[in-house]
Amino acid sequence: MAKSYYSTVFEQSAEQVWAVIRDFNSYPVWFEGVSESHIKDGKAGDAVGAIRDVRLGETDVHHIQRLLAHSDIERAYTYEFCEPFPYPTRNCQMTLCVTPIIDGKRAFVEWWVTFDCEPAEYEHWTHYFAHNVYAKGLESLRSYLESKYPSEQK
């Protein structure tokens, strides 16, 4: 099993960061390039088992994902890709987690995925998820938070 990981520090508090991302259906709010997201079957964005259909930009590319775990106490959720898989990987489980940094009331944000792939593809996919998905997504989140909480910037 492979693991790809990315982390960063936000100047906003963990509570502020979590308030933006806690809803599994909030991707279009903070993730640049996601044009729409909706939860199927009328479930809430924090309901384990909720399935979201995420559309990328103005394309016909959709990612279907199922929420596996959600914790307001841990400020984290875990989800998986549903078939058809958008990547040639298997058993993908992603976790997005926000931890308070007490010194300065900032937030430490981690995003990782565990997955199976062909051994020859391991380096490609670990780099791809960390830098092409999670780094870009968290930079989009940073931009959104800086616009929402401009007085929090140093």
Image (cartoon, rainbow, N blue to C red):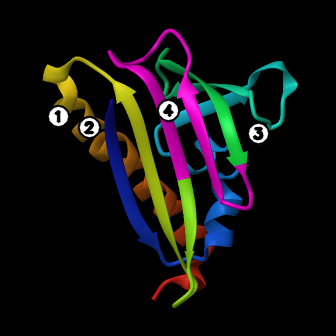
Residue at x 51%, y 57% (from the top left corner): 141
Residue at x 28%, y 20% (from the top left corner): 117
The numbered dot on residue 93 is 4
| Residue underneath mark 1 | 123
As measured in the structure, the alpha-carbon distance from the residue carrying label 4 to the one carrying label 3 is: 18 Å
- Would you say residue 14 sits in the magenta stretch? no
Q: Which stretch did the figure color magenta?
A: 71-96
Q: Residues within 10 Å of mark 4 (few under 14, many from 20)?
A: some
| Residue underneath mark 2 | 126
Dot placed on the residue nearer the N-terminal end, 4 or 2: 4
| Residue underneath mark 3 | 45
Quadrant (top left/top right/bottom left/bottom right) for the N terminus: top left
Give how far across and how far down residue 4 sits, in percent: 32, 42
Q: Secondary structure at mark 1?
A: helix
- Would you say residue 81 sits in the magenta stretch? yes
Q: Is residue 120 above or below residue 141?
A: above
Dot placed on the residue nearer the N-terminal end, 4 or 1: 4
Q: Are marks 3 and 1 in contact (CB under 8 Å)?
A: no
17 or 103: nearer the viewer? 103
Marks 2 and 3: which is nearer the front?
Answer: 2
As measured in the structure, the alpha-carbon distance from the residue carrying label 2 to the one carrying label 1 is: 5 Å
Give how far across and how far down residue 49 sits, in percent: 74, 27
